[in-house]
Image: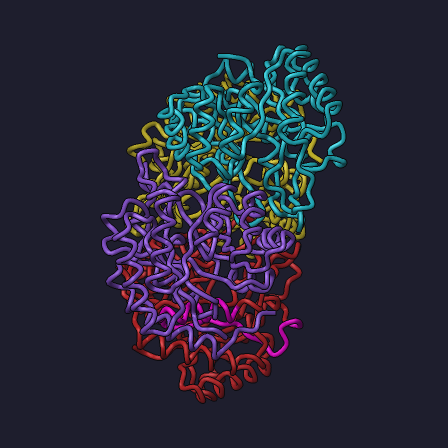
Chain colours: A purple, B cyan, C yellow, D red
Amino acid sequence: DLPLAVIAGPCQMESRDHAMETAGALVDICRSLNMPLVYKTSFDKANRTSLKGRRGMGLEASLEVFAEIKATYGCPVLTDVHENDQCAILAEVVDILQIPAFLCRQTDLLIAAARTGKVVNVKKGQFLAPWDMANVVAKLDDSGNHNVIVTERGASFGYNTLVVDMRSLPTMARQTGCPVIMDATHSVQQPGGQGTSSGGQREFAPVMARAAVSLGIAGVFIECHPDPDAAPSDGPNMVPMGQMADLLTTLAAFDRLAKSHPLSIG
Amino acid sequence: DLPLAVIAGPCQMESRDHAMETAGALVDICRSLNMPLVYKTSFDKANRTSLKGRRGMGLEASLEVFAEIKATYGCPVLTDVHENDQCAILAEVVDILQIPAFLCRQTDLLIAAARTGKVVNVKKGQFLAPWDMANVVAKLDDSGNHNVIVTERGASFGYNTLVVDMRSLPTMARQTGCPVIMDATHSVQQPGGQGTSSGGQREFAPVMARAAVSLGIAGVFIECHPDPDAAPSDGPNMVPMGQMADLLTTLAAFDRLAKSHPLSIG
Amino acid sequence: DLPLAVIAGPCQMESRDHAMETAGALVDICRSLNMPLVYKTSFDKANRTSLKGRRGMGLEASLEVFAEIKATYGCPVLTDVHENDQCAILAEVVDILQIPAFLCRQTDLLIAAARTGKVVNVKKGQFLAPWDMANVVAKLDDSGNHNVIVTERGASFGYNTLVVDMRSLPTMARQTGCPVIMDATHSVQQPGGQGTSSGGQREFAPVMARAAVSLGIAGVFIECHPDPDAAPSDGPNMVPMGQMADLLTTLAAFDRLAKSHPLSIG
Amino acid sequence: DLPLAVIAGPCQMESRDHAMETAGALVDICRSLNMPLVYKTSFDKANRTSLKGRRGMGLEASLEVFAEIKATYGCPVLTDVHENDQCAILAEVVDILQIPAFLCRQTDLLIAAARTGKVVNVKKGQFLAPWDMANVVAKLDDSGNHNVIVTERGASFGYNTLVVDMRSLPTMARQTGCPVIMDATHSVQQPGGQGTSSGGQREFAPVMARAAVSLGIAGVFIECHPDPDAAPSDGPNMVPMGQMADLLTTLAAFDRLAKSHPLSIG
């Protein structure tokens, strides 16, 4: 089994310098832990709670920075797509196209992402059962792209609350055959929980990550930021960059133990 | 208070003749009951469970039929939009643009729909609390469009199940100030409940409609079909056309009673 | 179809005078509306959130008051039982023994209640699917008691929240063959929602009642109090006595309409 | 930090020989792993789905067997109580009295259990938020018993389904100050999921156990049986005895790693 992959970075690309700095910090940590890193950041936050929420640098400006990150640090980059037309443009630079959870059933977006030939990471919708991700992956497969990753980010649980059912991780692995990622920071969001923005419980991100890694998953997705309380989005659930080295060190230890004790489900 | 509005029609536009026939039948029923009718049908089903699911006639062909329905029957028409570019094109003919539940937080789609100046009907996401629809409506308002309708269609409740919280209807009315519609047929869907397609419990659509209408809502949304079991999508939850006259007659009686006994909430 | 039955009264028996006064007020209202009344109150609140919560007058003292209510007003009375031994003692006076929702699967309590020969009202557990009430009723049936009523009072929906699925009312009717009651006040509880006591949304009790009555149910259960904010328990979700006449008048109108338009499910 | 405690045994005491045999097998496994064992079995299943379900040997007969197990193997025993009177009787032999989840808010049962002075293990109700267990523990504390354990066994998630929110484990630890146990087998029950009995997904019990143990909890609760498919209750979710040695060996490894990397929450 491969070592735990890390998909990490700030929620949105705030500036070229901010992106380079956070990428550099994460590259250093992951290299020292021998963990593969994918740098993640959004060029556009397409579903802010309010129109007044900052949305990111936009596609054009971001592509240049993504290219610079790849050239400078040699690590693959991931970003999320919202419209069909964006897929081909992003695919010129970006290594993994991510389908947001709300959009995981939009057929045309899945097809457009699949046709780029890039790796596609689909986040499981908050409204979807784990076994129903098999239908989502089938759409990508039937579009000729078999490089698919699936990500757990919590299921709707009453109002303004998500819950992670740990059974979803082995269930998705078995039913889709894809690598499974745990998104440890969005799964502790409190959607809409702060009136005009979403709340979050960043203190539980390590709980989610550790429990999931103990099951032998392929990777973790962790949004992080040098100063989450000052971040334009997802601040309440991002992990402070200063805690990432310790967190990933611990997760690496759990990953080694988990992969030397593979779970047999069913 | 205005009489109950009826938004009805088959899930997807299957053919010109099918659309004309179902529109005509609904026009007759609603005229005899003195209920305002909005004919609803989808030109494209953008999130079928499987790629093999039939998707509808497409935008171009549908626009002609929508125009013919309006010319022939004089009733307004509603359809759902999935991509920003579709809004302006549809707005040339369609009277109400509908934002699908999964897409209710996609800012750009909301803005594009708002800018057409047409009435916008937003379905509440299965993952959203009723009070959070105020944020969605604010995006439309802030884009200069105040002709907004909001629709309840169920909230995620465990796996493959939706539940309608009747409190959501007065809550949305109070918090958004918009007319509130009950979608009586999608709220009895069983998402993903049949493996590669969604199931449904059409026998409960009259239950949902009646309970909601008794609260004094602005309208009901009911998908119907001459032969639901033969329909290419949403068959399990559509109401047979042959039952619509009785169902609407009953709902009209409940509507009159409800509006002569307005609820005072809080 | 019989007219809507009303099960009403304060959450707990606070004193003899309080009970007589509230019973008298309800008897007057229901007589003028020609609705059968069952006076409900608890002699003991066995599951307060905190030990410090007041629990009621106790079994012995309450029995005398129940007898006085029956003698004075001629209306049947209902109370809830918590322990097997209480059933036979209460059955000497009380007409309907109620099994609390948390206890709806306690076999011995069901058997003890069944053996009294009295009507047994079982509240559906917050953790139970509507169709699973068939198993609960079968325990009573198999114990020789076929006078069973079932009551909806909400299902767990995330944390500190209940939701009422209106489908549960016709589902329980069909699957158990029993009269179905809607508990309009406990279903708007917010369990544990106030730290050391439960919150509630009494403003939504008329919403729940009206939606349910429109489906043609057998009765409503409504806790009410002359001054809910001063009540020792369930204050946040009890209806002020001063609003009961209007509320029941409205419900009677919906009941007549519902029963002249019976729902056909499946 | 103490090593992971194991609370294990068959769902119900089926016979003296069955109990001695399963206790002996578990004692051997736990001794070799240096894990403290508490033998668990029920003398009475008080809330079977159907009256026809077998309920166990009963209190009197069970007490003798519990005493023999303690004398023979030197391990403490745990059983669940359903009625106030049972507490003092059981306390003569049994080391830990367990409050079933459905009964976790029954004040008198909590008081009766507390007054025995024995350790009390309270299972969190399927309808309770983790933070609301603080109120439950306060009732025991206020009754003079501070030897309290709390157990996670899943929360209601739609119909016939439970979900475990891993955040509940550190939340209960912090809010109650009590040792926290993960019940890995009841949390994979499918309540009512088989019509007249409850289903289960025993293949996921190791998933639940491992994820929870990775968080550094005090113990695991695992029902096990030499032949689960032949067990009179909870067969679908019990772990075969033949898999317990491997399962506990793995959990011991995760426990050591977890306790050398304590989580800091908040």
Between C187 and A248, the residue placed more toward the observer is A248
Q: Position of residue D254 (x, y in %)?
A: 41, 76
Q: Is residue B94 above or below residue B158?
A: above
Residue at the image position 45 percent from the left and 42 percent from the top: C162
Q: Position of residue A152 (x, y in %)?
A: 47, 56
- What span is colored magenta in the figure? D205-230
A177 left or right of D71 in image: right
The reply to whether the magenta stretch includes residue A257 is no
A244 left or right of D198 in image: left
Residue A170 location, quadrant: bottom right
Q: Position of residue B187 (x, y in %)?
A: 57, 36
Residue at the image position 51 percent from the left and 73 percent from the top: D41
Between A3 and C163, the residue placed more toward the observer is A3
Residue A30 location, quadrant: bottom left
* Residue B177 seen from this side: yes
* Residue C256 seen from this side: no
Q: Position of residue D49 (x, y in %)?
A: 61, 57
Q: Is residue D115 above or below residue C262?
A: below
D109 left or right of C144 in image: left
Total numbered labels:
0
Q: Is residue A11 above or below residue D27?
A: above
Between C1 and A239, the residue placed more toward the observer is A239
A238 left or right of C121 in image: left
The reply to whether the magenta stretch includes residue D211 is yes
Quarter of the image with the C terminus of chain B is top left
